[in-house]
Image (cartoon, rainbow, N blue to C red):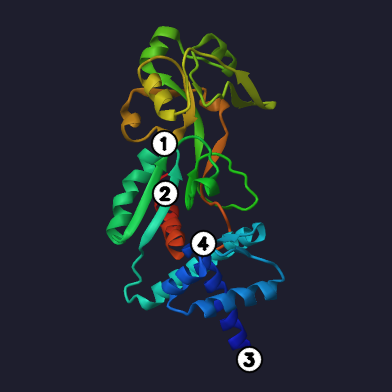
Amino acid sequence: MNDEQVEMDRFQELAAFVAVVEAGGFSAAARRTGDSQSAISKSVSALERRLSVQLLNRSTRSVTLTDQGRRYYERTKPLLEEMAQADGELMSSTHELSGLVRIATPATFGRLHVLPLVPQLLTVHPKLQLDLKLVDSVQDLLVEGIDLAIRVSPFHSPDAVVKRVANTSLVCAGSRVYFEQHGRPEVPEDLVNHNCLIFNGMENWTFSGPRGSFNVPVSGNLSSNTVETILSAVQAGVGIGMFFRASLSGEWRDADIVTVLDDFISETRDVSLIWPNRKFISARVRQVTDFFALRLAERL
């Protein structure tokens, strides 16, 4: 048997195994694939012999995955999906993107910078489906089924692929009305006498000076897990907030909000695009990532 035949047999074994898992049995898998039940059974048995492991628990009523079978299925199914995607692209004369891409982005940043780009992406690729989640909280991307995350904060995962596309600085800001009533802080330590609005539990704000970076503990009468809430309260004259300069765009640019303590803030944050796993990234996710990488770099 030549190498080509060996590779073909291995692909058939894998395809048969996945079909059995997804159809829930050998006869159902045979109906789905058009192969005979005996051929499906032989392929799966050959796969188990080659791996020297039992992948399926078989009974007269049901077929279930063993623990090792479940792990193998979770690793190999994306490979088949990637191959199917590649085949579809080659067979398509237009190479038109189609299918679902789930994207997660911080709420305010997403509304200001990601949503305006969506119509252009869907105009170019009308068969593409986007599921856009605007959430400020960091989540488990794999558990949530996210294909692409857009982050404006550090992200640490050994399996993730992070692509930096731009950066934005932090700013300390309040409304002109607030500063007229309460005065402007001249140094970061002055913030202890001001109503500081707390985003996501950040009660220590970082500044820099001649001796390096230092933290100032702050407090106030409003805290929230969304930047949108903090920005709205800042605009209304409630207090002072700390957030990304990228958030001061759109309607917020003309909201009579002014920054303070600029000479004491040097910290920046990367705007990054993240794949939750480095293996088997579909072509549509790669192209959507490339689109946002280019367009976000132009906006920021």
Which of the 4 quarters of the picture holds residue 72? bottom right
Q: In this view, does 151 lie to the left or right of 256?
A: right
| Callout 2–callout 1 Cβ contact below 8 Å | no
Q: Which amino acid does label 2 sit on?
A: Leu
How dense is the environment of label 2, judged by Cα within 10 Å: few (below 14), some, or many (20 and up)? Answer: some
Q: Is residue 110 above or below residue 253?
A: below
Q: What residue type is labelled 3?
A: Asn
Q: Name the residue under label 2.
A: 296
Label 1: which secondary element: helix
Q: Which tag is nearer the camera, tag 1 or tag 4?
A: 4
The residue positioned 57% from the left and 18% from the top of the image is 188
Is tag 4's residue or tag 3's residue first in the polypeptide sequence? 3
Q: Which amino acid does label 4 sit on?
A: Ile
The residue positioned 48% from the left and 71% from the top of the image is 27
| Callout 3–callout 2 Cβ contact below 8 Å | no
Q: In this view, does 258 lie above or below 148?
A: above
Label 4: which secondary element: loop
Q: Which tag is nearer the camera, tag 4 or tag 3?
A: 3
Is tag 3's residue or tag 2's residue first in the polypeptide sequence? 3
Seen as rendered, the residue at the extreme bottom is: 1
The residue positioned 45% from the left and 56% from the top of the image is 289
Q: Which amino acid does label 1 sit on?
A: Ala
Which of the two residues, 229 or 17, is positioned nearer the viewer here?
17
Q: In this view, does 85 lie to the left or right of 217?
A: left
Q: Name the residue under label 3.
A: 2
Distance between the alpha carbons at the discs numbered 2 and 1: 15 Å
Distance between the alpha carbons at the discs numbered 3 and 1: 55 Å
Residue 281 has which mark? 4
Which of the 4 quarters of the picture holds residue 76? bottom right
